[in-house]
Image (tube, rainbow, N blue to C red):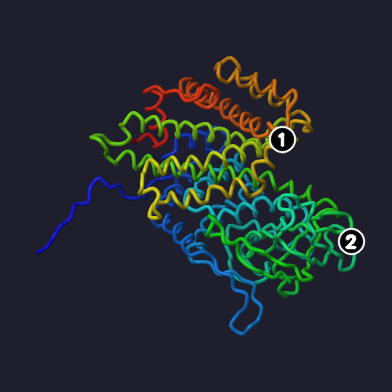
Amino acid sequence: MRWQTHTVFNQVAALNNSNLFLSDIPLREAVSRESAQWDAELLASIGQQLGTAESLELGRLANANPPELLRYDATGERLDDVRFHPAWHLLMQGLCANRVHNLPWQEEARIGSFVARCARFMLHAQVEAGTLCPVTMTFAATPLLIQTLPAPFRPWLKPLLSDRYDAHLQPGSQKRGLLIGMGMTEKQGGSDVLSNTTRAEPLERRGPGEAYRLVGHKWFFSVPQSDAHLVLAQAKGGLSCFFLPRFLPDGQRNAVRLERLKDKLGNRSNASSEVEFHDAVAWLIGEEGEGVRQILKMAGMTRLDCALASHGMMRRALSVALYHAHQRQAFGKNLIDQPLMRQQTGRMALQLEGQTAFLFRLARAWEQRSDAREAAFCRLFTPAAKFSVCKAGIPFVAEAMEILGGSGYCEESELPRLYREMPVNSIWEGAGNIMSLDVLRVLAKQPGVMEMLSAEFDEVKGQDRHFDRAWRQLQQRLRKPHEAQARDITRQLAHLACGAQLLRHLSPPLAEAWCRMMLDPRGDTLINTQVLDDLLLRATGGVG
């Protein structure tokens, strides 16, 4: 006899073949509002390509097949290389072809190119986040290297600014595209880089652009297959920044030994390593003792990328959850029509509305940072954004998992990978305490920052009582800020920045709902039906 135990029904297929840009109305509005409308057609094309089943499968494969350390070749020669799955290389090709690593640094860059690049970065984050690590470091290092690249490496500028991805193991001068990594932290110090012990001695002369010999180690050496790294080491003049190429100008391999690859919770597709420098040769960037100052020139951009990546993954989690809720039935209705589920997904969509508006306001400030007020906005709100958005991502993805139920907890779903990936952006480039203390430092020492805050927030004063009350309370706390309150102050600053943007640009009912949800200390309140309908339509591109 043939037995049929059951018929499969009321199951939701994977979300694929959607346009990641066109389905996100808040993102489309932010891109247009912040001077990057000229890129909308290309962003729609990128969104369509990234939303395909093929692209999503590349993201899965790159994480299911993590990189492999190759210490030696077949003859026993020291190799110190990393082997990646082909999916990694295909994803990297797409990132470089879309100039996510260098768009604003092009000579012909248009107004809004920083904003456009942020949108492209955010779209890629929805498919695979590990590949964003080499991209963000290259992006942050490039403007510094354009000004300070040592003389033997000046020919690198052309491939550094190209749209090519070149994974060949050969000197940078022979490649069509280049990537730059970073190596800052050591075992004994972590974020306390002043405790670094790696030593640097000049080969001949001291000074900017001169060659030094490095002896020491790095506990986290990001993307070891990069063509060069910017590293910190102690020179006679203090902690200094050095340009450490993978190959020396004569074509010989530099003396950088890969000890092992990190076995990480998430970020599995990306290689993070421990290394030792055995008389490795590196070139001084800037003056001796200026290492921290040089690194800080890049830290703001890498921190912004942490927030953008977390937001992109949150957006993907919401998309998957909404797609499921629109099709899965329970108790006689689609999940999305159940009142409690509608409130839950609406609140998640509302949270992303505020983050989207805030992050792209911040992207515009980065583009206009030659202006003193915009520079102050960047300096204060970049660490605040990294703290608030990256922290919010972990429980947000957990909420999305609950909407899918047990299926969302299984590896066939995208959500477990997103959940594992989320904490890295809170940790990398400075954990939450570091970000919060940085915010307090800016408030105390950055010229013009309080005037900038007043101009930003007073402009929308009187439009919403929740916003006004929260701003008054924060002003009182800022008169005598205490280090123990740094996290609360940072979170409140970020929430007010989100609220200010929504009060400026969104419909009053939607902006009021956001301020009530995020700024009312009394806790949760229901979102009315009309606002819910509007939120869910905006979150699905006007469909659903």
Q: Residue flagged by tag 2: what amino acid is it? A: Arg
Identify the residue at horizontal 57%, vertical 36% (top origin): 360
Identify the residue at horizontal 47%, vertical 63% (top origin): 87
Residue where numbered disc 2 is placed: 206
Q: From the viewer's perspective, is 513 left or right of 183?
A: left
Identify the residue at horizontal 44%, vertical 40% (top origin): 399
Which sits in the foreground, 537 or 111?
A: 537
Q: Going by the picture, which residue comes out furthest to the bottom?
A: 75
Q: Going by the picture, which residue comes out furthest to the left?
A: 1
How far across and down, in percent of the image, does residue 386 sit? 62, 41
Q: Residues within 10 Å of mark 1 (few under 14, many from 20)?
A: some
Which sits in the foreground, 417 or 48?
A: 417
Of mark 2 and mark 1, the one earlier in the sequence is 2
Q: Going by the picture, which residue comes out furthest to the front?
A: 484
Quarter of the image with the N terminus in it? bottom left
* Number of marks in the rendered image: 2
Element class at badge 2:
loop
Which sits in the foreground, 56 or 279?
A: 279
Quarter of the image with the C terminus in it? top left
Residue where numbered disc 1 is placed: 375
Q: Is residue 9 above or below residue 219?
A: above
Q: Is residue 127 above or below residue 437?
A: below
